[in-house]
Image: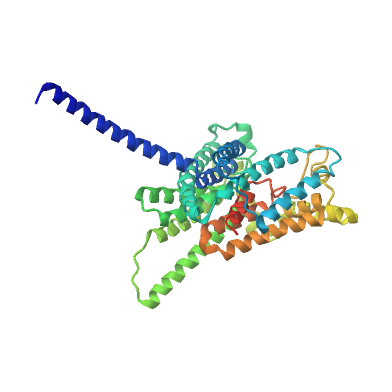
Amino acid sequence: MALGDLLWLKMSSSSTASNIFRQRFGMVFVQLLSIFFSVEFFLAIVYGILLLGITLPYGVPLFFPIVFLYFILFFFRNSFSKHLALKLNIGIVLFLFCILMYLIGMLFNNGEIYSQNVRDLKNISGLLMVLLILGYFSWQKYDNFIRIYHYLTVPVLSGVALFSIYNFYRLIIGSDVMLISMEKAERTIGISLSGSYNMFALGMLCGIFAGYFSFGKSRSLLFKVLCAFCILVCTTAVILSGSRRGWIILSCIVGFLLVRYLISGGKSHLTGEKRIFSFNKLNLGVCIILLALGCAFVFLSAERNVEIEKPRQMEEIYFRFQTIVSEEGSFKQAFSKRTERWLFALELIENFSFFEICWGSGFEFLPLIGEEFHPGKKAKGDPHNFIIASFLYSGLLGFAGVLALIILTIFSLVQKRDKFGTEFVLVYLTVLAFTITGAPSLFSVRLLPVMTLTVFSLSK
C-alpha cells in the first residue's frame, strides 16, 4: 500500500473518531439543555431559591429574576406552536380570586401604597408567571421534579446548616462571625442568623424531610451518606434555632418516627420475621440521639452559665424553651405576643361597618397595629395571621376565599397523598403551620402559594 493511502486511512479514522466524539458530546449537551429548560427543573430551582431565601442571612433575591427568565424562555419556545397553557380548576380560580380581593383591598388605602403592598405585588406578579409555566406540568414529570429537588436541596441546605452552626460557635466564643455583620448577629436569637428564627427553622425542617425521604430512594452510597449528614446538621440547626414552633414540630416528627419504628418492630415480632437493622432505622436512631444530645448541650450550658464571652445567645434559647416546658402559664407566655395581635385585630373587625364586613377596609390596619404595639416609632404592624389579615383588608369575601383555598389544598393533598408522597404533604403542612401564625398575607411567604399552585397544576 502506498504511503499516501496509509496517510488517508489514518486521517479518515481520526476524523471518524472526532465525529463520534462530537456527536456524543452534542447528544449529552442537548440532553442537559432539555433538562435545564424543563418545567420540573424550573420548579425544583424555584423551591431551592425559596428555601435559601428564608435560611440565609441576607436572603436570595433571585425568585423574580429566575421566574421571569424562565417565563420568557417558555413563552418563546411555545408561542410559535401553541398558546401558553393555563389550567383552570376550582383551586386556580380560588387563587386568582384571592389575588383579586387583595387588589380590591388596596383601593381602600386612601391612595397610599405601603411597603408590604409593594412586596406582595412583586410576589403576586412572580406567582402569576409560575402559574402559567405550571400549565406544562403533569404527573409524568412529578417524580423527576422530586428527584431534582432532592439533589438540589440536600447538599445546599446541609451547607447552610453547617455554615450557621460554625457561625454560632464563633459567636458564643466571642469571635467575629463570617460574612455577617456583628450588629446583625447580636440582634438574632440562637443559630438563626437570617433574622427570622422561625423561617430559618422552617427551612431546616424541609432539609430534614428531604434528607430522610431521599435517603431511602437513592441507590448511591455517597448520596446516602450526604442525606444522613443533612439530617444531622439540619436537626442540630433546628434545636439551636430558638424557634418554639421548630422544636414542637421536630418533637412531633421524632415521636411519629419512633411510633412507626415500634409498630414495625412489633409486626416483625408477631410474624416471626427476622429483620436486619436497616439504614432508615439507623437514620431514626441518629436523629433521636442528636436531639437528646443537642438539647442537653444547649440547656445545660445555659443553666450552668459556662464561661463564654457572649452567653446571651444561650440564655435566649434557654428562656424560650422555658416558656414551653415551665408549669406556670408557659404556653400562654409563648404565644402571648401573637394572641394580643389577634385580639386587637378582632377588635378592629368588631368596629367595621356593614360595607367593611363585606369588602374590608384595605390596609389601614398596618399603621394602627404598628402604633398599638410599637408606639411612637411610626412602624407598620400586622396581625401575624394571614387569614385574619384577609378579613381586615378584603372583608368576609376575601376571608372566605383564603380559607376555602387552604381547606381545598389540604383536601386535595390528602385525597392524592399516594401520588404526591408523604414528604410533599408533610412539607406543605409544616409550611402552613409556620406561615398561618406569622405571615402578613397569603402572598408574603412565597413557598406556601407556590406549593398551592403545584397542587392545583396537577388537578383536572
Q: In which quarter of the image is the N terminus?
A: top left
Q: In which quarter of the image is residue 335?
A: bottom right
Q: 283 left or right of 62?
A: left
Q: Where is residue 70 in the image (x, y as percent from the top left)?
A: 56, 39
Residue pictured at 77% horizontal, 44% vertical: 381
Residue pictured at 29% horizontal, 35% vertical: 20
Q: In this view, does 96 lie above or below 331?
A: above
Q: Is residue 127 above or below residue 256?
A: above
Q: Where is residue 372 in the image (x, y as percent from the top left)?
A: 82, 45
Q: Where is residue 245 in the image (x, y as percent from the top left)?
A: 62, 54
Residue pictured at 80% horizontal, 51% vertical: 394
Q: Where is residue 52 in the image (x, y as percent from the top left)?
A: 56, 42
Front in this rendered view, residue 421 or 241? 421
Q: Hey, which residue is sitting farthest right in the picture?
A: 353
Front in this rendered view, residue 126 or 166? 126
Q: How many marks?
A: 0
Q: Is residue 458 visible?
A: yes
Q: Hey, which residue is sitting farthest top in the picture?
A: 4
